[in-house]
Amino acid sequence: MQPLMPKATAVWLVDNTTLTFDQIADFTGMHPLEISGIADGEVAVGIKGFDPVANNQLTRAELDRCEKDSTAKLQLLKPISTPQPKKKAPRYTPLSKRQDRPSAINWLVRNHPELADPQICKLLGTTKTTIAAIRDKTHWNSSQIDPVDPVALGLCTQIALDAAVKVAAERKAKEDEAAGIVPPTEEERLMSTEESLSMDPREAMGGAMSENDPLFVPSEKPEPSPFDDLSNVFDSPSTPAEEQPESPAELDPDAFFNLPSEKEDKRKDGED
């Protein structure tokens, strides 16, 4: 760890202490020849000395200890700059998807009211002001905002959403327990999609179903119906020859349409 303004500190130590060049070079991180050049007036010309004692980098007792022992090394009183933890950069949202954030916020507010505003901000990269405006319906485009799943919009992953919902549910359960609120029973609890798909349709509907229900599943296989096999529907019946009905007599077309016969025509011609 080097002191603040090492060259100016070396100038001050050369002018105001009896430390060796090696001690000053080791403390300031410079070469002993540079310290020798400072003492000769060839290096750091015009640089004003920087007092490390007045600036809380060294103590007078530390200087006295090292001046008495030429092999001792100077120790900084405390770090000049404390390393600050790096702040996580805000979540970047592409410009093409920023217009979809109000719809995603509206969906989360409606379907997951247990989520806190900081969680929504972390998921979607938005601000608490925007969330409050959408929740209170004071947003400038509130009438045109439709709730849309943020996962479908690509604003967050399903894993991140499930993790946030799980944390919010645990926090809400603790708050309800502290407030004396009884949690819902197993029948009242909202099942997940995987649980509902794995259940029997009768149990999912809360009891037995009638045959008219679209999800009705018969418990036993019904008896076969004569209409199940339709392969022989269009086959001709095998009727014995003696049982087949006789063909009807040939009909006279003239008699059928009440047309006059040839004899009647000749008689009429003779009369004429």
Image: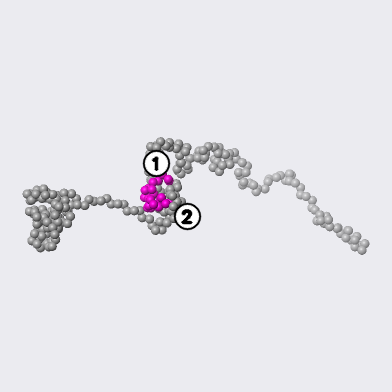
Q: Amino acid at mark 2?
A: Gln
Q: Is residue 153 visible?
A: no
- Name the image quarter holding residue 243: top right
Q: Position of residue 5 (x, y in %)?
A: 17, 57
Stretch of the chain drawn in magenta: 112-134
Q: Which residue is mark 2?
A: 144
Is residue 37 inside the magenta stretch?
no
Q: Secondary structure at mark 1?
A: helix
Residue found at x 90% / y 61%: 268
Nearest to the observer: residue 71 or residue 243: 71
Q: Is residue 187 visible?
A: yes
Q: Mark 2 and mark 1: span between their CA atoms? A: 31 Å
Q: Residues within 10 Å of mark 1 (few under 14, many from 20)?
A: some
Is residue 131 inside the magenta stretch?
yes
Q: Position of residue 199 (x, y in %)?
A: 48, 40
Q: Is residue 196 above or below residue 145?
A: above
